[in-house]
Image (cartoon, rainbow, N blue to C red):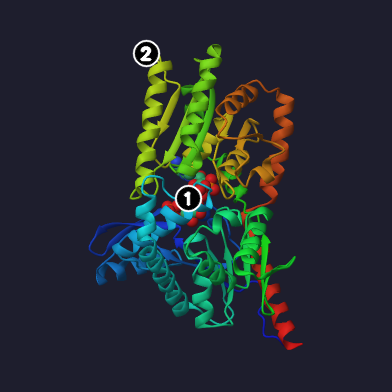
Amino acid sequence: YEKLDVRPLRQRLLVVANRLPVSAVRRGEDSWSLEISAGGLVTALLGVKEFEARWIGWAGVNVPDEVGQKALTKALAEKRCIPVFLDEEIVHQYYNGYCNNILWPLFHYLGLPQEDRLATTRSFQSQFAAYKKANQMFADVVNQHYEEGDVVWCHDYHLMYLPKCLKEYNNNMKVGWFLHTPFPSSEIHRTLPSRSDLLRSVLAADLVGFHTYDYARHFVSACTRILGLEGTPEGVEDQGRLTRVAAFPIGIDSDRFIRALELPDVQEHIKELKERFAGRKVMLGVDRLDMIKGIPQKILAFEKFLEENSIWRDKVVLLQIAVPTRTDVPEYQKLTSQVHEIVGRINGRFGTLTAVPIHHLDRSLDFHALCALYAVTDVALVTSLRDGMNLVSYEFVACQDSKKGVLILSEFAGAAQSLGAGAILVNPWNITEVADSILQALTMSPEEREKRHRHNFVHVTTHTAQEWAETFVSELDDTVIEAKLRTKQ
Ligand code: ADP
Ligand code: G6P
């Protein structure tokens, strides 16, 4: 290895993701406060401790002036973060447009937005141009901070063009790319006008990772069918150059959740929640308010359950905590009003003067409040229509070692492959099936709950975020070493 000038494992890691782990809020001309960002990508990467990592990304805010940019850069440096400044127009076209209105729904099998399909098609070219431009801006910042030997780990659908831009700067850069969403069937991917460009630029990376074997397989099929390249058991080969493709299922920092449950503050929260919901079983949903999470379907299934099981009406409560997200995208605005309308109708129908069946909060909870809520929950409902992995299900399991509650989990979440044996798996589109599974969960014997929980708990505590990152980075090292050996032969 020394002869090949490859550094040992604990090298510097440059994590590049659209979203920084903190989002900035302006408090004055040169003063900023930083708040933790929501989402699975941030949660998983914050769980990775054993690397000297720097994080390059967008702070979620437009900063047009130099004074503001300087002050924010300084504030972020304390968190080992480096900002990429994107102006309003780029954010509109790249983030709201191409990323969240086109790639996100498509990768989750929801197709293009229904009502403005034609408008989307017309604006496609300009949005893709903005996407490429934004990716180039990320590459410029990476290049400014890159030191020889660094590992550059690019994340998610926002940055599919980045591996190509980075390799154009420096072909020796060690570049990995990981997708946090599903990669859809090649039949879905091929509808994208920019399908080939995106695949080719991802293939510029040395290692390409997905949550599940199925997503990796879909990606390889897309490369063989759309680009006519050769798929091998290791990945995709193009004129003798191999891009390694593999599955790296993500995890959480489970110890952080388990330890938090012992804190006095969390214990106090738990006590309050138990008093507040005494005599009722607690069901919980925690999601970003996103169309892929199946929130309307979940609430309709709960309504069906109440309709068909009148004896449970005053004995159960559904707490749905839905943090607003991507609020400038019209589809997300529509979803918010739709969810409010359904919740209002059901509470009007089944509520009494003293209690309502659904508590819906449009907000983010702090970490301690979230842990307490997970701990007092009897049944967690994760009904994603599609989901890369879904870490909420992992967090719930980590907090349930004393209660041993039941997880109802969509078969279309990546987590179904790891927690499937412990959870009750459902098709979230089938409201009757979900309603039946709620009854099954609420009436499950303690022995059965214990058995199912044990299975999930072992998985969540052994397949952690740290293990995920170490496996990915060491595989990336091996891939680069093997490639060097091959070219030397
Ligand atoms: P996604 O990445 O699509 O948001 P995940 O389930 O993988 O889905 O991750 C969501 C992350 O965001 C979890 O760590 C979860 O705790 C956090 N989160 C989601 N909704 C809320 C909320 N309302 N309050 C606090 N944290 C939330
Ligand atoms: C998902 C995506 C992440 C994203 C997160 C929150 O987890 O995979 O890349 O950061 O959602 O979405 P946002 O658009 O707010 O960054």
Regarding residue 181, the answer to whether it shows in the image is yes
Q: How many marks?
A: 2
Residue occupying image coordinates x 67% and y 85%: 5
Task: Classify mark 1: residues with Cα within 10 Å, few (<14), some (14-19) or many (20+).
Answer: some
Query: Image point 74% across, 32% down: which residue?
Result: 451
Please tell me which residue is depicted at 33% across the width and 59% down the height of the picture: 92
Q: Residue 212: where, in percent of width, then height?
A: 66, 53
Q: Please tell me which residue lies in front, 486 or 432.
A: 432
Callout 1: helix, strand or loop? helix
Find residue 388 and report its horizontal and vertical position in percent: 57, 50
- Mark 1 belongs to which amino acid? Pro
Question: x%, y% of residue 71?
Answer: 30, 68
Q: Is residue 63 above or below residue 451?
A: below
Whether residue 367 is visible to the viewer of this picture, yes or no, is: no
Circles 2, 1 touching at the beta carbon (< 8 Å):
no
Tell me the tag on residue 473: none
Q: Is residue 116 above or below residue 221?
A: above
Q: Which residue is mark 1?
A: 105
**In the displayed structure image, the side of residue 218 where residue 14 appears, left or right:** left
- Is ligand 2 less than 8 Å from the beta carbon at label 1? no
In the image, taking residue 378 as reference, residue 242 lies left or right, namely right
Q: Which mark is residue 353?
A: 2
At label 2, the amino acid type is: Leu
Residue 77 % position (x, y): 41, 68
Q: Residue at image x 41%, y 48%?
A: 113
Q: Quadrant of the N terminus?
A: bottom right
Q: Secondary structure at mark 2?
A: loop
Look at the image and tell me in which quarter the C terminus lies.
bottom right
